Structure formats: C-alpha cells, structure tokens
Amino acid sequence: MPTIPRPEDDLRQLDAELAGIDHLDVPVTPAPSGLARVWAQLWPKLTAIALFFVIWQVVVWTHWRPEYILPGPRKTFSALGDAIRAGTLPRAVGVTMRRAALGYALAVVIGSVLGLAVARNRILRSAIASMITGLQTMPSIAWFPLAIVLFGLTEGAMMFVVILGAAPAIANGVISGVDHIPPLLLRAGRVLGARGLAAYRHVILPAALPGFVAGLKQGWAFAWRSLMAGELIVIIAKRPSLGQQLEFTRGNQDYPGLVATMLVILVIGIVIDSVLFGRIERVIRGRWGLVDGA
Amino acid sequence: MALRLTADAAPATFGRLDQPAVRVRDVSKVYGPAGAHTFALDRISLDVLPGEFVCLVGASGCGKTTLLNLIAGLDRPGKGTIEVGEQPALLFQEAALFPWLTAQKNVELALQLRKVPRRQRAARAAELLHTVHLDGFADKRPHELSGGMRQRAALARALAQESPVMLMDEPFGALDAITRDLLHDELERVWQASGLTIVFVTHNVREAVRLGDRVLVLSSRPGRVVAEFPVKLERPRRLESPEVAQVAGDIVNRLRAEVRSHADDSEA
C-alpha cells in the first residue's frame, strides 16, 4: 500500500485552496441594522391596529346600533381606565392568568408525555393517535355540561376542559415533530452511539422541537379559548375572572366595560401568541436555517 | 500537522495487520415479501485490511448502500456474518449534521456519546475541526456552512468516534467538482495521517481510482463482488491524470459489461 507523505508545499497549497474555497462558499447573509429591522417589523402591525380602530369608529359613526349599545373606542378606553383604577380588571386578569398558567402547564406535561409515547410506540399509535386528533375537533364548550356534572361549578371543571382542549394539540405537535425527523439524522445518531435514552435526549427530542413548539402554540390557543368559555359558564363566587367580567358587564348593561374586557382578552391572547411563541419559533427557525433572508 | 486519533498514542494502524479490519462473509440481504423478494446482496464476501482504502463501485441497484448499512450495524444481514470490531464511523452523502448544534457542538456530541470527560471535549473538538480546516467556523451552525464545509465538519465528527473503520457512502456526490477535488486531497491526508481503514462507496469510477488502494466492482441484483482492481498508482494521484483515466477505463468497461448482462432481464 503506497502511503508516501505528501511534500510540505503541496500541503500548504491545499490549506490555501481550502481556505480560499471556504471564503467563496460561505453563505452571505445581509444583516440589516437593528433599528431598521425593528421598524420594518413594527410599521405593518401599527398600521393594522390603527386601521382597526378607524373602522371601529366609522361603524359607530354610522349609527348602525345606538352608541350606548355599541360604544366607540373613546368610551371603551375610558371604561378600561375605570376598570383598571377600580382594581376589578387587574384582579380578574390575575385570577384568569393563574388558571391559564396552571391548566396550560398540566396540559403541556400530559400532552408531551402522551405525544412522545404515541410517537414512538406502534401499538399505542394505532390505538389512540386518531383518537387524539378526534379530540381536537371536539368544541371545548361541548365538554362543559359533563365537566359540571363531574366536578360541579369548581376550578376542577375548568381545568378539566382546558386540559382536554390543549393537551391533544400539544400531543399532536410532539407526534408530528417526531414524524418529521429526517431518518438520516436518526441513523447518524445511531452510528454515533446514541441509543435508548441517549437517542431521545440528544437526537429525537431536539430534532422534534420545531413541531413541539408549533403544538405548544396551538395548545395555548385551545387552552385560552377553553378557559374563556369555562369562565363564562362556571362562575365561582368572589373569584372575579375575565370571562365572568364579560357576563357581569353584559348583565349590568355596561357595554363599554364589556368591550374593554374583550379587548383585554384579545390583547393577552395576541401578546402570548406572538411575543412568547413567536419569539421561540423565530429563534428555532433561525438556528435551523429555516429563515429566508431577513 | 499532527493528527491523532486516540488521546494517548498515535498508532499508525489499528488491530493486527494480518487480520482484516472488516470481514464480510457470505452475506445475503433480501428485500420485499417472500416469493416476490429481490436479492439486494447475494452471498457477498470481502475483506478489508487494516489501514486499507477500499472503494466499492457499481451500477444502481448493486446494494452498495445496503452493504455499508450492514457493516455499520444499521441493518441486519439475512444470512452470513460481518466482523468489524467496534462501531464503525459512517459518512453519508449529506453531512447529516444536527442542525440545532454548531459545528463544534456536533463534534462534541460525538465525544460525549463516547463518554469522553466533559473537560476534554471542547479542546478535542477544536483540534478535530482544525484537522479538517474549519478553525474559524466552530460556532457556525450547519446551515451557515457550505456543502464542502458541512462534509468536513461531518468528517471531524466521524473522526471523533475514534473508530478504526470509516465507512463513506458517496460522501462527495453532492459537491461541485473543485470542492470535491480538494476534499479528495483532504481525505487522503487525513487517512494517511491516521491509519484509518476506509470503505468508500461511489458510482464515480475515477473518484474510486483517485482514492482507493483497491476498487471492487459490484454486480447488480443480486449484488456480488464480480471484479477487483488493485490500484498501484503512486500517491498523490490526480483525478484528471492519464494513469487514473486508464485504470478507470478498464473498470468502466467491466461495469458496462455487467450492465449489458441485465439487458434481457425484462424478457426473462
């Protein structure tokens, strides 16, 4: 077997050639300045919000409904200010967010474990994978009569429905995350010695992360909707919540207060969806090189 | 440049010289249901000596990749035995780097899975990246690297396994010609410095002659070794040299004869 060492000159030349081709080959990504990028992302959103308020105001001005029934933005914001100063709104937000956090956390745990078990176990998959998807199509409000029979008008009834709403979405996210792992990565992992638990820890879980986060995001949307439905129906004394606030303001004919509460519900949903999950998704997509250009 | 494959010593070869590093004996592999099955591999036998660079060429359907998967332990042979010592390293046509890890962390993961102590991993990974000329790119993620750089990062990760045997499944097939040429030089250098045993699958006959000590021609359906061409040309060889072209010409003729023999298959 001829293994004649290469002359030093040749080696140096190869070094230079490799360095040269690397410089030519490295993908160039233009990085816009921080401020310009923030503005580029911000102005369409600000415009959309402004447009929303303009349309709302125009609808009020048309007197389609009298203004004491459909209040305009100005009245709504003054009602919002009153509710914040009186402390009813902050308290309601506190109660609702605590419920949302607890229910969602439980759903994440249950959904993740369930999803992972189904994704990697053929028997479990054929047994309940379609059932999980089926659960997702069930409107969460349809669970409440049963939940109230089982748990009464309690926190438990709400948690039950929130978990049933969110956990299947999260489980489905895990399953699709695992299903979309390129087989090549699994094989590469096996060759490197990642077997059993190590394969989960180092290959399967990180590789399934994009799907998992998509499931978490969807799960949050389901949890938030289920909780609002629950708070409208399951009203617990001395525990004012956002859903309950909707019911009370309607009952008291405080329509600016009603719309103000709706605004708060909408804003919380958007903020958690876009700020929290949007950021996580952006980071992951950036890391994986799934972002095109900017 | 110093290249070492174990932490303590720098052995030129692994194992005993007179014992094959890879021994494949009468291995058959069948795909498809009984009755309608096709032989991917039919009683294939081959030996690869320690430190040897063996290239496998063949037309499509010759089971090259199947054979590598069997040697790598990713699949089980239907019949026959494969002896290969510890888990061989395997390079794919795509780099198969983990996209969520930087080049450095990809290499470190290979070390971690081999239970290399945490303190040593970073330095060792940096050293391996240096070996493949990726010094400035340790903190880049795979998508930030070019195809050639990804393959070199994958090579560094494979070297981190410190397996005496490296299996390569058309690793440069997706690269442009100049990059491939440079990586041939690079791979040859790593191989000569390390004493690795390499089994290299390709459909590019010139590439096989450029790199291999020996070129094995596989037949198609069923896959068998039908010819063996020792390449006695002095190293370093050049892909475009007349000597390489001449040996490659002989091998191509053999391959064409093999393909011709399947012309009547559809009528049979």
Image (tube, rainbow, N blue to C red):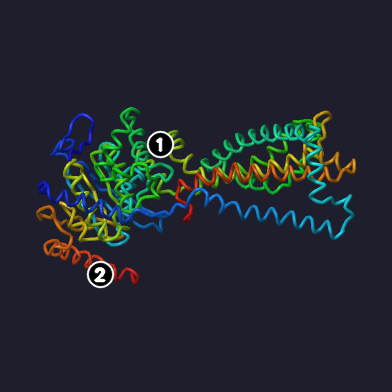
The percent coordinates of residue A187 (x first, y second) are 39, 45
**Count of numbered labels shown in the rendering:** 2
Question: Is residue A134 shown left or right of residue A19?
Answer: right
Q: Nearer the viewer, mark 2 or mark 1?
A: 1
Q: Secondary structure at mark 1?
A: loop
The percent coordinates of residue B51 (x first, y second) are 17, 43
Question: To which residue does mark 2 refer?
Answer: B260
Q: Please tell me which residue lies in front, B39 or A138.
A: A138
- For the N terminus of chain B, the image quarter is top left
Question: To which residue does mark 1 refer?
Answer: A195
For badge 2, the amino acid type reads: Arg
Q: Secondary structure at mark 2?
A: helix
Question: Is residue B36 shown left or right of residue B58?
Answer: right
- Above or below residue B231? Residue A76 is above
Q: Please tell me which residue lies in front, B37 or B170.
A: B170
The percent coordinates of residue B181 (x first, y second) are 22, 57
For badge 1, the amino acid type reads: Arg
Give the number of the disc on residue B102.
Answer: none
